[in-house]
Amino acid sequence: MTSAEAHTLTGAYALDAVTGPERERFEQHLAQCESCAMEVREFREVSGLLGAAVTSSPGDALRARVLAAVTETRQLPPQVEPPLVLPVPLRSAPSWRARAGIGLAAAAVIAGVVVGGVVIGGVVAGRPPANPVAVAQPQNLIAAAPDAVTVTGHGAGGGTATVAISRSLGKVSVAIHDLPPLDGAHAYQVWLIGPRGPLSAGLLNPGAGETSLVAPVPADANRMAVTTEPLAGSPQPTTPGVALLSLG
């Protein structure tokens, strides 16, 4: 185990998820690294707060109100720019064949934008199609930021959580890998933790293919936790964390 690898185990060690020879080597490192020892103490304090939150679960009435509001809240339609209309020269009226050609060309452009989604391309003045341009995913933009920090930690019951954070963008991406499967009534909820306590960053449901998310990160958030919550989420953590990571 290298020193760099040891620094990533503080959250897992605080949750007693490091065992065997790996635990022995980490404890040897811990005796010589004050920064890791401090992180372990802070993570254990956060873990205790998450565990204590179980004693104050929200009532059934709150869940019913939230679910009722979800069914009554209409999503806003997507904003679609109006198609570009080219002026027709006044000196001559186009024939019906020319008008049909313009209409078909406009329809092809609009269909390419709607169906293509993240790929832009086309044929202009008899030239070959332009090279497709792929739109970068938000996770990639965060990881590519000059100040980006990426951290990976082990889950208490197996699996890993990977976090990329950019303070300049004010964004964080979280991805989970091989965490224990959940039943259909629960999901993993991500929390960003700072002096104000845990704030929800969203839900991850591996059973539905949702294993990563991007969320705004509060300026004072310095830790990330993942807990098991009801499928609709919780306003505050109700179970001890299955993963804890320092955001640096």
Image (cartoon, grey):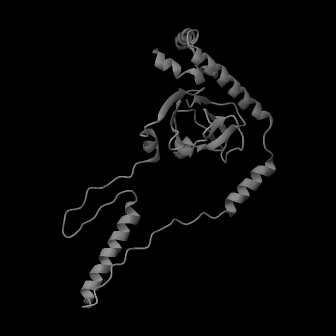
- When asked about the image quadrant of residue 87, the answer is bottom left
Measuring 52% from the left and 30% from the top, which residue is drawn there? 160
- The residue nearer to you, when weighing 94 against 213, is 94
Name the side, left or right, on which 29 lies relative to 127.
Answer: right
Name the side, left or right, on which 102 lies relative to 221.
Answer: left
Name the side, left or right, on which 20 lies relative to 116.
Answer: right
Name the spot of residue 142 as percent of width and height, x first: 46, 42
- How many dots with numbers? 0
Residue 153: tell me if it is visible.
yes
Depicted 30 relative to depicted 204: above or below: above
Name the spot of residue 114 as percent of width and height, x first: 41, 65
Measuring 28% from the left and 86% from the top, which residue is drawn there? 89
Name the spot of residue 120 as percent of width and height, x first: 33, 60
Measuring 39% from the left and 56% from the top, which residue is drawn there? 118
Residue 16: tell me if it is visible.
no
Name the spot of residue 147 as percent of width and height, x first: 46, 36
Depicted 40 relative to depicted 25: above or below: below
Quarter of the picture containing the C terminus is top right
Measuring 23% from the left and 61% from the top, which residue is drawn there? 129
- When asked about the image quadrant of residue 40, the answer is top right
- When asked about the image quadrant of residue 77, the answer is bottom right
